[in-house]
Every structure is written in C-alpha cells, then in structure tokens.
Image (cartoon, rainbow, N blue to C red):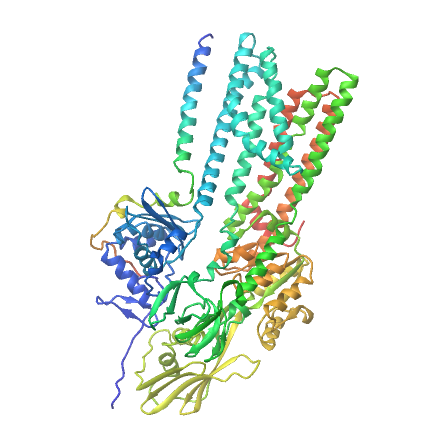
Amino acid sequence: MSLELEKNIIQNLKCKHCYDKVITPFYDDKGTAFCCQGCRSVYEILHSNGLENFYSIQERTGDYTKAVKNISHSKFSYLNTSDFLKKYSYSSNNRFIMTFYLEGVHCLACLWLIEKLPELVSNVERATLNLGKSLVEVELKAGEQDFSRAASTLNHLGYKPFPISNSVEEASFRKKEDRSLLIKIGIAGAAMMNIMLYSGSIYVGATGSYISYFGNISLLLCLPVVLYSALPFYQSALGALKRKSINIDIPLSLAIIAGFILSTYFVFTGSAHHYFDSLSTLTFLILSSRYLLRKVQHTGFDKKNLASFFQQGIIRRINTNGKIEEIHSDQIKVEDTLVVMPGDIIQADGTLVKGETKLNLSTLTGESIPVLHKKGSFVYMGSLNVGQEIEIKVLAIEQETRLGKILGEVERQNNQKSHYFLLTDRISKYFITAILFLTSISFVFNFIFFTLEESLMRSLALIIVTCPCALGLATTLVFSRIMSMSAKMGIIIKSEQSIEALAKAENLFFDKTGTLTYGDFSLHQVTRYKKAHIPYSIEEIVFSLESHSSHPIAKALVNWTSAYAQKTLRTIKWAQYEEHIGRGVRGFYNNIEYEIHSVRSEGEDTTIFLFENQSPLASFILKDQVRKEALPFLNSLRNKKFNLFLSSGDKSPIVEKVAKELSFPRLHVQSELSPEAMAQWIRDYKNAVFIGDGANDTLALSQASASISMHGAAEVSLKSSDAFLYRNDLMLVEHLLANSKQAIRLVKQNLSFSLFYNIVGASLAIFGFIGPLEAAILMPLSSFTVLLNTIYGTRYEYLQKKGVSNGDH
Amino acid sequence: MEIIKFLIPMALGMGMIFVGLFIWSTRSGQFDDLDTPSKRMLLEDDETHLVNKPITHERKDV
C-alpha cells in the first residue's frame, strides 16, 4: 500500500490562546495545541516576552479572548511616509503620538497586554488604552517616528489597528471643554453647599450682626458661581439672541443675574432675604444634568470618517517596476493595479484582471452566499474576497464607487434626520416666550397699580418661580437615565432623537439573514446513500476534504463532522487534492476519486453531494436556521400591536419558507430586494423601524425613521442606525422599544408636572401672594419632584420587567 | 460666640484648598477617562512587572 493512514485523534482539544475548540491543530515545538497559526504566533510573542500573565488575568476575570483569526503579515510601512505622519500624527515635546482604533479589544487582559507595548517594541514610550472607545494612544520615544513596528506588533497580538486621523485641535478642544465644565460644576457644588450653611442659619433665626456677616460671606461665595460657573448659560443665551431665536438659557440667565443683583442689594441694605443658595443650586443642578448627558451620548466618530471602517488601511499595489508595494487606501488612484488577498476587502471599483475568486457581496446586496467572479468581471468596493488571490484594475475610487454613492446617500439622510425637532425644544420655546411675555405684562401692570419696588419684586418672583429648571431637567435627565440603563442591558442608543423616533414605532421591518436567522450555514439534513469503499466513515471523508477550505459551506460541514463524531476523527492523506473555486473540492485515495460539490437547483436550499467515483455517497442540505427565540419574540411584538414586515435580498423560496415558519402574512414579505428597492419599500411606511445588520443594510437603515442594528462593529453600525445591540439577542429589541416608550412617557409626565407647577406659581407671583423668597423655596422643590419621578421611573429592575411584559398599561 | 467669626474663614479656607485640588486633578486629566483606570487598578503590581520570568501559571482546562 503506497498510502499510509495517519491517525489523528482529536479529543476536545482547546486552543491554548483563544480557548476555542481545535479542529485542525497547529502545534508548537513543545506540543501545545492551537486552533490556528494566528493564535500560535500570538502565544509565541507573549511567551518570549514573559507576558504569560495575560492568561492568568483572563482566567481570573473569566473573560477569554476571541482572537482575530487570519492575521495578515502586513508591514504597515505606509505609516512612516511623511504625508501620512502629517495627517495622522501629532507631536508634543518632540515626541510623535498617533491614535489607533483597535478591533477586538474587550477585556481586562487586553488592557494589560496593550499597555505592555513599550516592553514589546523598543521605540514606544507609552501606550494608553481607552477601553470604552477601543482607542489606543501610542507615543514614541523622543526623535523616533517609526509607527510601523508598534502597529504590526498590535496586529500580531490580534488587535487590528486602524489609524485615526485626529484633527488634533478638535480632540483637544473637546477635552478642554469637558474639563472646564467639570470644574464649573465643582465650584458651583462647593459654593452651593457652603452657602446653604449660612442661609440655613438665617432661616432658623440668626439675628443681629450675624445676618449681615452671613449675607456677605454668601455673596462672596456666590460670586464665582455667577461670574464663572454660569458662563455657559450666558454664552448660549447670547448665541440664541444673535440668531434671533429663543432657548431655555435666556430665562435662566435672566433669573441668575436678576436674582444676584437683587440679593446683593438686600445684603447691602441689611435685609435677611437673599437667594444665593437657590442660585447656586440651580446652576449646579442644570450643569450636572448637562454634563451627564454629554457623557452618556455615544457620538462616536465624525461623519466625515463614515467610510473609513469599510477600508482596511493597507493595500498591495503593483508599481511600475512590477513589484508589490504596500500603500494606504487613501493613496489608491484610478488605473492602479491592486493585489487582493483572500480575506481582504476590495477598496475600489474595478475589473478583475488576473485570477478568479468568490466574493462576498453582502455589504452591497445583503446576500451572504459568495459569488464567483472570473477574469473581466466587475468588482465592487466593499466586497470581501473569500477565495483566491486576485489582481484588479481600479476604475473608480472613493465617492465614485457604488459603495461610496450609497454611503453618500446615508450621510444625506442622517443630516435630514437631525432636523427632527426635540419634543422639549418645541415646548420650551413656547413656554419661554410665554414667560418673557407674562413678565413684561406683569411688570407694566403692577407698575401702574402699585410702586416700582413692588412691581420689581413681583416680576422677580415670577421669573424665579417659573425658572425652567424643572423643564431643563425634565428631558435631559430622562434621556440620559434611559440611555445608561439601556447600555446596562446591552443596547447603545445614539441620541435623544433616536429615542423619540423609536418610541413612535409602528411598523417594524426585519432583515432576514443574521437578524431573524443566525446568519451562518448549518446542516439541516443529511442523507446517506451507501457506505464508502475505503475504511473511513462519511464524516471522516468530508472532514478530510473540507478542513482545508475557508468557504462558509466547508466550515459548516466541518462543524457538523466534529460535532457528530464527538471523539475520534481520522484524517485521510490524499494522494492528490484540489479545490476548485465555485465547484468544490476533490481528492484521490487508492485511485478512488472523492468529490464534494453543490448541486444548487434554483431557489431550493443549498444542497451538497459527496461523490465516490461520480456516484453519490451522501447529500447534505444546508440552511441558515431561524433563531430559536424568533417566533416567541415576534408573537410578543404582535400582541403589542406592531405591524411586522420581512424584507430580504435572498431568493424568494428561502424567504417564503422563513416567512411561513414565523407566520408573516404574504403581503408583509418581500424578497430578492436590492438595497435601493428595500429602501423604497420602507419609505412608503410611516414610523418605520428597520432592524437589520448594521454594516450591510446601510441604505435601508437610513430610510426608516429609526433603525436598530444587531451586529457588526458598533461604530460602523451607529453611523447609520439609532441603536446598536451588542448582545446578540433579539429580545433586546423589545426592551429597547419599551425603554423608548417609557422615556417619552416620563418626559410627558415631567413636562406636564412642571407646566402645572409653573402656571400655579406664576399666578401666585403675579398677584403678589408669594415673594421672591417663597419663590426661591418652591423652585428647587419642583426640580426635586422631577428628579425623584425620573429616577423612580427608570429603575433598572422595573425596565427589565417592563420590556418582556405584555404591552403598555 | 464671637469665635465663629474666626472659625468660619478658617473653614472656608480649608474648603478652598479642596476646591483647588479638584481643579488641579481635573486639569491634569484624571477625570478624562472614567472607565479604564477603574479596571486598570485591578491589575496587581506583580503582574505588571513580571518581565522575563518563567511561567508560574498553567492554564487549566475546564
């Protein structure tokens, strides 16, 4: 026998690095098993640098990495070109600093490892990771400007780095603004608490010289609040006046300034009345609620960088000498010839000039099955190469590509959406106009019938009592609480507008692949016709044939074999083995030909056959399966009176089957939709919410009045959608909708309460039943009522229960 | 009770020191990133200085 059997016993092996199940083991010289080459090289880097503690931290926190597979061995040499340095880095103290977005950062062990970068790369001075944003700031040693070593090391560790073009001014401006707001809050808070001590003493009956003493101290303490902490109010009020519009800061500034002047006057005339405590409390509360909201908002990156996450950075270009050079995707020009390796995303529209391959076009079409492309075919930017190495000639770049045009459309839609008026904005505009109008009327009216002093007092009481403090808190606090509670559940909400739009949802559009289904192929049915002539089981033949292929179908088959056999699988050593793109794989053993290829009758599920000398041994039906929780989830939404739709780019028989399984009515299902047609369909419905795959359905996502994306990178998805679920769980959609509804309900409650309070307070003040002092006591009471109502209404346990209970009560 | 007129400025002075410290800590960037440092402190010192030491920990299979 010329061929030998090699027994390869695989018993529940776990990869040393990523802890995944090992199918085809890769061993290092000590016999440690890894699932792939990538994991082995990461382990070797860590091991040779004494960084094995990575694994013990992981074990302690119970948080294991999902290593990035198929690490490319790019050199990142483009990082060092002077053009690039100018655009992407900045220097401070003669040291170059560059910021990278890292893919795959998620846990404490990652944090530890990444900040060890100076120990791994000699020219790195410092690496500081922001875990929440997955951004790492890499600072080089003085005089160094070679970022490529740091980048390729990060890449080898399994964190794919994307340089972020930070307009330095913008970033540092934001940072400064954050810090100065915090200082303003701190000063207002300190002043507020100290002033309360002295006001309290006056309220409980301090007499004689103490009154003026305490008054003077309060005045001194209140000065920095009025002159510094309250500055943002004045600035925004002036800005609004310049634009000839009205905002909430106008009456606020008015109340603060008028209250301060009047209180100062009282202190100097020896009166016991002053409102320094309420002024500083007001400033402190409103500043804090604004700061909180600012912190919770995940604005992410600039819209300008919309396309940057579809880009992969390093591109291989064939230069005029016929040599391959690495360039950044910014540098591609029309007519260039690019080399696209398996696993790369094509970075430009063009024609295929060498080789043939299968491309995954899901970014453009939503269709997950790869399509064969031959020499001369048109290839689009954004397609993923899942086959062989190819060369393409560039015809269009950036905005001129099909993807570029779609993204341009998305951006246009996003800008339109931001014109959505916020509920409070509208209300407070009317409200503030009414207050200003009322105050002037009351001033004139009281001046005619009483004295100037009385009229001043009443107007001030009116302004203080109607101070839109509660109104200001009413919405910002609710939205920031709902956003942070949702984040706790696993939902990131983009903005207040998103909550408002989601709360109005009536028609829900679901994408099929990856949303209602798992998005992966799995084996649905196996039919065995006969036994093989050689002493191997069908599982072993399939395993040996397919374990080398990276095609999704091959992966599904290999998963099936290892799951079915459980313990022992022997690998066959083929005398001859070949993989034909788009046709399948073939191997010879003992001069018997074994072949796996698909017989894809149009419209049916994908059927694969295993042949022995051209006669079938077994057939496999592969399916993208419907999620377990999909039907109960949809039924619960139906009980809540939502209209549900199913839209898909897939072939109609497949879609119809899923629709039947999930009992969608025929009229609510459309299949074989192009992204443009899908967008068109959604546009016809009011208050439509699209739930889909963030990166793949960008156009459809932007057409709906609100959209939710289920998976993909968070930053990409949030560009085009309103909410992102980072736990891959359909039930979260229900929670999200319930939370948004609850937010709007609370806002309405708070608004009606503060309106009611204001109307009563205003009437009392106009007719002189309450003076400025009583007004100053009433005002914080209304704010606290709003505060309590909001916190009570957004309790985590309450929201958690509400999401799954039936409907609104 | 006259002593209070002396004690209050003293108390205020102490308060000012803390406000000053708060301003300093904010300016030096201690409040810029509230997520990462809270996790970073969980890493023990010996783990951050274990360069070139042999493996002390074998990972167990679950």
Counting from the top left corner in percent of width and height, residue A4 is at 25, 85
Whole-percent x and y of residue B48? 27, 47
* Of A242 and A513, the residue lying toward us: A242
A236 vs A561: above or below: above
In this view of the protein, can residue A391 be seen by the observer? yes
* Residue A578 in the image: above or below residue A292: below
Q: Residue furthest front?
A: A320
- Front-most of A320 and A546? A320
Residue A781: percent from left, percent from top: 62, 29
Residue at the right extreme, as displayed: A449
Place residue A273 in its image quadrant: top right
Would you say A791 lies left or right of A30 here? right
Image height check: is A319 above or below B34? Answer: below
Across and down, in percent, residue A692 comes to: 56, 62
Where A600 sits versus A432, above or below? below
Looking at the image, residue A57 sits to the left or right of residue A456; the answer is left
Q: In which quarter of the image is residue A475?
A: top right
**Along the line of sight, the residue nearer the viewer: A344 or A195:** A344
Q: Which residue is drawn at 56% across and 11% down?
A: A211
